[in-house]
Each structure stands twice: as structure tokens, then as C-alpha cells.
Image (cartoon, rainbow, N blue to C red):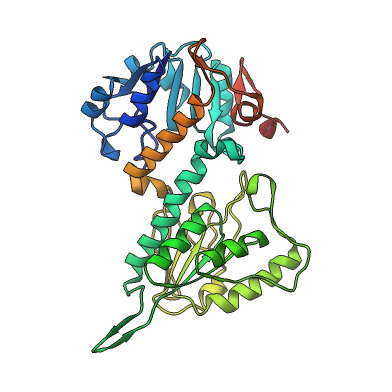
Amino acid sequence: MKIAVLKERAAGETRVAASPETVKKFIALGNEFAVEAGAGASAAITDEAYAEAGASVADAKAVVKDADIVLGIQAPEVTLLKGAAKGAWVAALFDPFSKKDLVEAYAKAGFEALSMEFMPRITRAQSMDVLSSQSNLSGYKSVIHSADVYGRAFPMMMTAAGTVQAARCFIMGVGVAGLQAIATAKRLGAQVSATDVRSATKEQIQSLGAKAIFVEDVAGIEGEGSGGYATEMSDEYKAAQAKLVSEHIAKQDIVITTALIPGRAAPVLITDAQIATMKEGSVIFDLATAQGGNVEGSKPDEVVVKHGVKIIGYANTPAHLAADASALFARNHFNFLSAFWDKEAGKPELDDEIGDAVRLTKNGAVVNERLNG
């Protein structure tokens, strides 16, 4: 089979869907591998490195020609796939709920779209989960960038000239990104606290040495949805949570928000009124800016100053760690396809559980239940 990787064309996208490491592994399975010239440049991977790994490096048209599988970070427009084999697989991020026209275009063109963000959160798919691998880096980056913008020290420092107090850092949302943010802030010496709508995360927060901030007087709300994602909360819980957060947030120097619900706009966690209670010079990093934002008034890739508080956030946080993000994404791709590789057939055969979860289109139709429901 021929596997192809194109240069990413989305604005601000610096990652690439294959590394020399994964190129070697795919070739070892008996495949031909082709990479568009310059595809890895922004992730510090040269064309020579791909060639040394065994890939052919050429222009986009030659790379796609007769390709059976195309790997991407963000799904390429259908026009870029002209010349690919009939029924070719394309594995990438499709943002299916927001880009239904793109999914329909793939169906019409006869390609099999495999949405990597629809990977089920089950044990055997953990090594294939791009959302987790990329969120982990996002949580780290949110703290590092916040520390830079904050302009003061994170750890307590006792000097002859006096003591510098440790920064207070509050993490809202304790998924993969939130847990990494807690760990990173702790390593930098901050006083860290965190909250989440899922009560099961309390022990995780405490295990990392952070203080858990939870609503205790509203019973029967777990906040755990299918696949480990948070669900929307009742009005009663939201009111109690808002009160607790308002009291806590006023004392914080750094706040990092991470709340996302697949297929929906990001929930607003911090209002303008709450921002107004924070100290001058405080920083809020909104990891959800690309989906509307958790913070009232936040804007992707802009520093917004409200009430003396700097509100920041990237449209594409993993792209700011291109080399590591690409390496992990590439391994997710390889782990996904190689797990189902049929050596006799010389190609992967997806099973029903994972295949049905990630497959958006097949045989000219949109087939995913989450889109057709």
C-alpha cells in the first residue's frame, strides 16, 4: 500500500502527521511512503530526514497519486486528494460537528474519512488517542506561557532582600490537559488548586499535591459522561459552582481553564464580573478559545486585558510545541493502523468497535451514528 503525508495548509498549523520514526515502521510493514516536500519544516524535520527513513519526497500531486492511505493533522480539502486511490482512507482531525460540509465532500468523493478525534476512550485505544496526546502538551504549554506573561516568580523565594511569595494557580477542568497543568505548575513551585464537575477527579487532584476545590452541598451530581468526558451540569450545580469559584478565583494569580464538551461550544466558566474580582496583573489562560472560550471576552491568539487581568489563549495550542506534538500525533497514527494490520492482506482491517467509532464516510455516504443521529 502507498501511504501519503501532505504539508498542512490550515492557518497556524505547524505539525506534521508522520515522523522519520513512524515512516520506518510503516515501511517495515511492507508499505511505500511518500511525503510532500517541506511537510516537516515547521516541526524541525527535514526532507532529508524523511528520505533517510525511506520515504519518497515530492510535490503534493505526486505524493497523493495512487495513495491508499493519507495521514494528516487537520483533514485536507478534497481537491488536494485528486489522484488518490478509489476509496482511499484519510485519517486526520475532521472537526465533524463544525465541518459537516467537509465530511459530505469526502463522502461524495468516495473517500473513507477516519476522524481521529472520534477515537473511543477505551483502554486498548489509549495509544491511538490524539486528543489525549495533544491535550497533555496543551496543559503543559498553558502553564509555561502563563508564567511568562505573569511577569512574576512562580515559586516561593527566600532571599536576603526579602521573601517572594509563591504564585497561586487555579486549574478549572481536570482532564488530560488539566492534570498536566497541575503537575507543571507544581513543578514550577506554585500553590496549586483545581476543580472539576466530575467528583471522581478529586483524588487525582490530591494525588498531584494540589488542593481540590469542589461543591460539597449539591448531591447526586457526578458530571461523568460517556467516554470519560464531562457532561453539562444542572442549573443548581452551576449556581453552586459559580459561587464557589467566585470566592476562590478572587485570590488567584493564575487561572487556567480547560473545559470542552465534544460537539458543543465551550461552556463559559468565568464571567466578566468574576474577572473584576481578581488582582491587577493576574493571568487567565483559556485553553478553549478555539471553541468559543471558557472565559468571557477571550479571543484566540490575542492578549485581552480586562480589569487589569490578562486573558490569553491559543487557537491551536499543540502547534506551539510542533516537534513534540508531531512526534506524538505520528505515533498515534501508527499505533492506530498497525494494531489492525493484516500481514497476509498487506493492509489494515478495522474492527467494529473502533472502526465504527472513527469512520465518518464510506461508499459515498456519511455512516457515523454521531453525525446521523
Q: Nearer the viewer, residue 232 or 80?
A: 232
In the rendered structure, the answer to whether residue 98 lies left or right of residue 300 reads right
In the rendered structure, the answer to whether residue 84 lies left or right of residue 277 reads left
Farthest residue in the left direction? 48
In the rendered structure, the answer to whether residue 312 lies left or right of residue 41 reads right
Q: Quadrant of residue 120?
A: top right
Farthest residue in the bottom direction? 161
Report if residue 75 is visible in the image. Answer: no
The percent position of residue 46, horizontal first and vertical second, equals 23, 32
Name the residue rendered at 35%, 66% in the picture.
147
Q: Report the quarter where the C terminus lies.
A: top right
Name the residue rendered at 66%, 25% in the picture.
352
Name the residue rendered at 61%, 45% in the picture.
262
The percent position of residue 240, horizontal first and vertical second, equals 70, 72
Q: Quadrant of residue 153?
A: bottom left
In the rendered structure, the answer to whether residue 56 lies left or right of residue 178 reads left
Farthest residue in the right direction? 220
Q: How many numbered discs, if any?
A: 0
Q: Quadrant of residue 35?
A: top left
Q: Report the quarter where the N terminus lies.
A: top left
Q: Is residue 337 above or below residue 188?
A: above
The percent position of residue 356, horizontal first and vertical second, equals 65, 27
The percent position of residue 342, horizontal first and vertical second, equals 52, 16
Q: Is residue 21 above or below residue 159?
A: above
